[in-house]
Amino acid sequence: MARIRSLIALAGVVALAGCSAVGSGPAPSGSAGTVTLVTHDSFALSDGILDAFEEQSGLTVDVVQPGDGGALVNQLVLTKDAPLGDLVFGIDNSFASRAVEEGVVAPTSTPDAFEGALVPVDYGDVCINVDHAWFAAKGLAEPVTLQDLALPQYRDLLVVPNAVTSSPGLSFLLATIGAFGEDGWQDYWTALKANGLKVADGWSDAYYTDFSGGGAAGPRPLVVSYASSPPYTVPEGGTEPTTGALLDTCFRQTEYAGVLDGAANADGAQELLDFLLSDEVQEDIPGSMYMYPVSPTAALPEEWAAFAPLAADPFEVDPAQISANREAWLTAWSDTVIG
């Protein structure tokens, strides 16, 4: 769950792209029997699953992970004339239109592909997560809505990933645009900033360092994460998670995979994509990447029904509107929140 580094890290990605032109960086894709997967830094499958694919297919899988979802797309755009791999996984619906418009991915005949190019692999709700134990210890009522987060009793309690470089961060920005509209979302973020909002470099830093319920006992009990995060905070020997998701704050995120345009091993990429859609992988995704599988026949972990429900009515923003306004929204968000 994916998920991102800071703009400094992104600058390093740009440098990597420049170096790869003179033979540095990842090994070239398309060497005999090799398929290169370019993905975000939260990609993970259980031990042995990729080994099984390699044994079945005769292919060797190389994995390149340049950062979170935003950095991933930026990297692919920068290197589209000399792609770093064969298959991409992890472009989400907040960045998908840009990847298609830039010609990063090749067309596909898969019926449910986004814009005829990107195939959905998993999905989940990006929501505010709350540390139940922290609020119980303080005797403070937990927030419920987006509006609650700007109230003075929740000052200095919220951390979010940077929307410019983090896909969960951008998804949460889109939740606020869906909630408050184009005329109101900037005022909302101004209120959050005035209420002590912290912006972390990416999801991993926000959740695992700043969040009090993420394992490092950070100082902030409210964080942008996923509705599927809480089941993984059930303590050893416990029966309930120590965290929960606020389901009135969510934006639904879909992650896609696609064969990169100009891939040296397009056939191997398609074979690996088909494997990602197999129930073997789909049933592993909840436990390894905390997302819901797209396959209707994939079994879910039992605890997800109780502790990882999806939002009944997540906030939505039309993909065409995202495509037309993403850069302007990100610039306005950065000016408002980062300054």
Image (tube, rainbow, N blue to C red):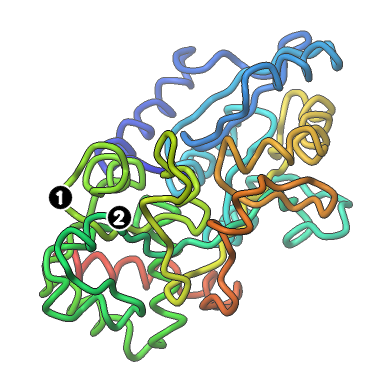
The answer to which image quadrant residue 306 occupies is bottom right
- Residue that mark 2 sits on: 162
Displayed quadrant of residue 28 = top right
Return the mark for residue 219. Answer: 1
Q: Residue at x 74, y 41 (%)?
A: 282
The structure residue drawn at horizontal position 45% and vertical position 53%, both measured from the top left corner, is 167
Element under label 2?
loop
Q: Earlier in the sequence, mark 1 or mark 2?
A: 2
**Mark 2 burial class by Cα count in 10 Å: few <14, some 14-19, many 20+:** many
Residue 97 point in image, percent of width and height: 60, 61
Q: Are marks 1 and 2 in contact (CB under 8 Å)?
A: no
Residue at coordinates 22% horizontally, 63% vertically from top-left? 135
Q: Nearer the viewer, residue 267 or 317?
A: 317
From the viewer's side, name the closer residue of 277 and 147. 147
Give the percent coordinates (x, y) of residue 179: 43, 84
- Which is closer to the viewer, label 1 or label 2? 1
Does residue 294 appear to the left or right of 151 in the view shown? right
Identify the amino acid type marked 2.
Answer: Asn
Q: Position of residue 289 (x, y in %)?
A: 56, 40
- x, y percent for residue 236: 42, 34
